[in-house]
Amino acid sequence: MIFQFIATGILGCVILYAYTQARMAPKVTGLAIVVALVGEYFVLLPDHAAYVANAVGIGRGADLIFYLWILFSLIGLLYLHLKLRVANERFVTLIRQLALERAEAGNDR
């Protein structure tokens, strides 16, 4: 019962934080809220996790949650990796443009 109380509070904070960031990343916000709500459901009704796990061919509900956590973590890491690559490419382009402008300004003197 204590874990359910703590987990419900943490997942509630995740939902609240995701909601406040909706303007910056609406797709990520939606996914985070759905995942947190599913987490809330399984925290409050753990027997349902076992039922869903058995329905998809996994022995225990805890294993299902663990496998889903691994999948979502990998998707999140891929998403962050791609965002960092895009930011890095923009940064490199900006630095190159700045270097060219400074070189042109230096030649005008």
Image (tube, rainbow, N blue to C red):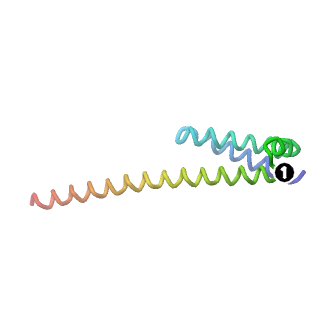
Which quadrant of the view contains residue 106?
A: bottom left
Q: Is residue 55 left or right of residue 85?
A: right
Report the front residue among 54 and 12: 54
Q: Secondary structure at mark 1?
A: loop
Report the front residue among 83 and 52: 52
Looking at the image, the residue that sits furthest to the front is 57
Q: What residue lies at 37% left-to-right and 55% top-to-bottom? A: 91
**Crowding at mark 1 (Cα within 10 Å: few <14, some 14-19, many 20+):** some
Report the front residue among 69 and 43: 69
Q: What residue lies at 43% left-to-right and 51% top-to-bottom? A: 86
Q: What residue lies at 74% left-to-right and 44% top-to-bottom? A: 12
Relative image position of residue 109 (x, y in whole percent): 9, 60
Q: Is residue 15 left or right of residue 60?
A: left
Instruction: Give the amino acid at mark 1.
Output: Gly
Relative image position of residue 35 (x, y in whole percent): 70, 43
Relative image position of residue 59 (x, y in whole percent): 84, 51
Write down the residue under mark 1: 59
Q: Is residue 21 left or right of residue 67?
A: left
Relative image position of residue 79 (x, y in whole percent): 54, 50
Q: How many marks?
A: 1
Which quadrant of the view contains residue 30?
A: top right
Q: What residue lies at 69% left-to-right and 39% top-to-bottom? A: 34
